[in-house]
Image (cartoon, helix red, strand yellow):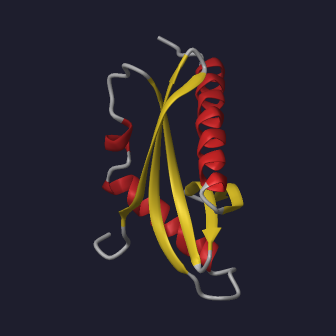
Amino acid sequence: MQRKMGIDHTQRRKAGNIGEDAVCGFLVRHGYEIIKRNFTVRGGEIDIIAEKADIIAFVEVKTRTIGSMTSAEEAVDLRKQRIIIRTAQAYLQNVAQPLQCRFDVAVVETEGGKVKKLRYYVNAFDASMK
């Protein structure tokens, strides 16, 4: 059975954009500057890179509709964490000054295309055990 990739991918991207927009707004309201969205290197992507004072936050955003079968938090498993860490290392190679960095996870729940809930996990994981 063939799956229509285009429609499903487009819908996921649209939902992802809603979640990322909400998280960017949340971060800006909390004093962060959005440095980059969807930073991509071969084999990895970071949804949002934000900076506040001397801290750079690499933020993974997971957007789900309310009542989804899979937990957004569970989707940021060890494999995904490793990809994010490698991608962050690639980004940091081009940063002039060394900054403290951390890895945050944001979970956005939507209903009818509107954000209903946002959970933000500061320092959700670190690079030491990966």
Q: Residue furthest bottom?
A: 97
Q: Is residue 63 above or below residue 39?
A: above
- Please tell me which residue is depicted at 32% across the width and 69% down the height of the picture: 130
Q: Residue furthest left?
A: 129
- Please tell me which residue is depicted at 68% across the width and 81% down the height of the picture: 95
Total residue callouts: 0
Where residue 96 appears, as percent x and y from the top left, is: 70, 87
Q: Is residue 124 above or below residue 23?
A: below
Where residue 100 appears, as percent x and y from the top left, is: 52, 80
Residue in front for this viewpoint, 29 or 15: 29
Where residue 113 appears, as percent x and y from the top left, is: 60, 20
In the displayed structure image, the side of residue 73 where residue 89 appears, left or right: right
Which of the 4 image quadrants contains residue 35?
Answer: bottom right
Where residue 86 appears, as percent x and y from the top left, is: 49, 68
- Please tell me which residue is depicted at 28% across the width and 72% down the height of the picture: 129
Q: Is residue 52 above or below residue 3?
A: below
- Please tell me which residue is depicted at 36% across the width and 19% down the height of the picture: 67
In the displayed structure image, the side of residue 115 where residue 121 appears, left or right: left
Q: Residue furthest top?
A: 1
